Image (cartoon, helix red, strand yellow):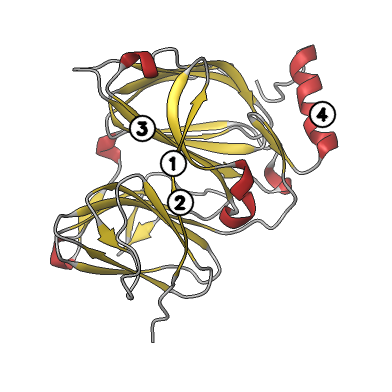
Amino acid sequence: MSTFREIKRVFSGKPTIEGAGVHLKRVFGYHEVPLFDPFLLLDDFHSENPADYLAGFPWHPHRGIETVTYVLHGSVRHGDSIGNSGVIQSGDVQWMTAGSGIIHQEMPEQVNGNLLWGLQLWVNLPASHKMMPPRYRDVSKAQSPEITLEKGVSIKIICGTIEGVKGSVQDIIADPEYLDVTVPAGTAFTYPVKDGYTVFAYALEGKGYFDQKKTQLIQPEQLVLFDKSGDTIATLAAADAVRFLLISGKPIGEPVAWYGPIVMNTQAELQQAFEEYQNGTFIKHP
């Protein structure tokens, strides 16, 4: 018999400026790390004003984490210190494992109007993989399978497996699922999750309830963090269809030493990373 998870907390994004002056909303970050393990941060950059985003995120380092960029509208041009470059367009995903160290830039662009909308999720790496070789996984919109379940529920699978259909991103350390889900108006949807895993839903469009008790109607740009116990979540769309990201992962349970774009396990490792960045020995796997 299914055990439904209850809502632990609801979060709303807070206006923040990052990079060279990009206006965005931070849904969770540094102060919420214990709650979201293995996830570290979720940013939502969503604006029709080019002045809010064109300054972008110029060259900067990462070590010890993975960054997941999902572009819903517009495009982001990227390049890095090990020769990767390209453009992430509407519906595309970039899953970057920084590992031992990478230096890159992400520069939003205007495409067919001024709207830019994207999300970036940071996923922690355990101590055993902090210094793994960096890697990129650029996944086009066409490469992310979409399935339709009963009652018309549609799911775009970025990472994970549903009814034998696998997302293009696989073999990730945190054993995550990253799904883009749309539930039709008035439709109830239940979904199995792994007991003990961190699970959250981030509303993109429409309104809906995310527990059987209908304790709170969730609005766009709100995040629902579920309790850890239970093997099923429930969603009920309200008058309109509700679209949301459903993300889960296995907690790491290790100390977090975090400053800026680098996340390690100890302050000594953190200090070493910045010293290496300053003296030119940061890149370990060219």
Residue 32, horizontal then vertical, whole percent: 59, 49
Residue assigned mark 2: 11
Distance in Å between CA atoms under marks 1 and 3: 14 Å
Residue assigned mark 1: 13
Q: Amino acid at mark 3?
A: Gly
Distance in Å between CA atoms under marks 1 and 4: 30 Å
- Helix, strand or loop at mark 1: loop
Distance in Å between CA atoms under marks 3 and 4: 31 Å
Q: Amino acid at mark 4?
A: Gln
Q: Are marks 1 and 3 in contact (CB under 8 Å)?
A: no
Distance in Å between CA atoms under marks 2 and 3: 18 Å
Residue under the point 40% across and 76% down: 4
Q: Are marks 3 and 4 in contact (CB under 8 Å)?
A: no
- Residue 105, compared with residue 7, is above or below; it is above
| Left or right for 168, reference 30 | left
Residue assigned mark 3: 118
Residue 111 visible to an observer of this rendering: yes
- The quadrant holding residue 74 is top left
Residue assigned mark 4: 271
Q: Nearer the viewer, mark 1 or mark 3?
A: 1
10 Å neighbourhood of mark 3: few (<14), some, or many (≥20)?
many
Distance in Å between CA atoms under marks 2 and 1: 7 Å
The quadrant in which the C terminus is found is top right
Q: Are marks 2 and 3 in contact (CB under 8 Å)?
A: no
Q: Are marks 2 and 1 in contact (CB under 8 Å)?
A: yes
- Helix, strand or loop at mark 4: helix
Residue 244, horizontal then vertical, whole percent: 31, 51
